[in-house]
Amino acid sequence: MWECQQQLRTDEGESSPGRKQDEVETEAPGQRKWMGGLSGLCRVTDHLYVSNVRAATDCSQLTRCNITCIVNVTETSCPPPPGVEYMHIPVSDTPASPLGEHFDEVADKIELTAGRGGRTLVHCNAGVSRSVALCMAYLMKHRGVTLLEAHRWVKTCRPMARPNEGFWKQLVRYEMELRGCNSVRMVSSSMGEIPDIYEEESRNMMPL
């Protein structure tokens, strides 16, 4: 599964630091960010990246971004390349899945790796729901931001980020545990319970 092929030096050139043409710089709270194309590794902080499973199994991208630890949030185990730490959280992308049980464990692992000068990649199948929720939990716990700020932060780095409603509920509870108050609340809509930041979008949707 690992695409550990020798990286070809073509358009990037030998002296290229690894940035491709489809990578763009962007901003998130207090940090300078870049996004390695929607199919690549997206940089959340200097020590945290998020991606889909395909990018996570591309050794050239892992090497270019100096990834030293991988958190796999899919139901299928995929051992990492030699020398890379590995954590497997086998949680399915369903609203009832207890992803919140792993918020502290993963957040602390990311922070520990950062403290050692390493970089963590968190990935799920699509890099949209499970991995994003864990990154948001990390930002709340170790960067001291609100859930609303964490969502904006990750959304800036990875525009397709969208945890399912069950993970949102767990993130809302986690924010209350961490801060004693909430910046996002769950509300009723024609689509069921959704975070209030999606209310306008829900109202604008045409019924089928």
Image (tube, grey):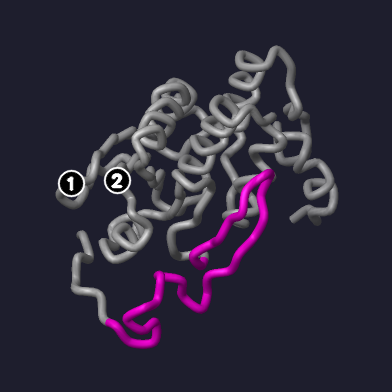
User: Which quadrant is the N terminus positioned in?
Assistant: bottom left
Q: Which percent across, then down, holds residue 83?
A: 18, 46
Quick one: label 2, few (<14), some, or many (20+) residues within 10 Å?
many
> What amino acid does circle 2 point to?
Thr
Residue at 44% across / 54% down in the picture?
51
Disc 1, disc 2: CB below 8 Å? Answer: yes
User: Which quadrant is the C terminus positioned in?
Assistant: bottom right
Nearer to the camera, 127 or 157: 157
Residue at 73% across / 28% down in the picture?
186
> Is residue 203 shown above or below 60?
above
Residue at 44% across / 20% down in the picture?
101
Q: Which residue is mark 2?
A: 68
> Is residue 190 shown above or below 101?
below
Q: Earlier in the sequence, mark 1 or mark 2?
A: 2
> Is residue 158 shown above or below 166?
below
Q: Is residue 11 magenta?
A: yes
**Dot 2: what SS?**
loop
Looking at the rendering, which quadrant does residue 72 occupy? top left
Q: Is residue 98 magenta?
A: no
Number of numbered discs present? Answer: 2
Residue at 37% across / 58% down in the picture?
65
Q: Which percent across, then down, holds residue 55?
A: 36, 60
Nearer to the camera, 34 or 203: 34
Q: Which residue is mark 1?
A: 83
Any mark on residue 40, and which? Answer: none
> What amino acid does circle 1 point to?
Gly
Instruction: Give the CA distance from mark 1 to mark 2.
Output: 7 Å
Where does the magenta region start and end?
9-37
Q: Magenta part mainly helix, strand or loop?
A: loop
Q: Which percent across, then down, holds residue 40?
A: 44, 63
62 to the left or right of 194: left
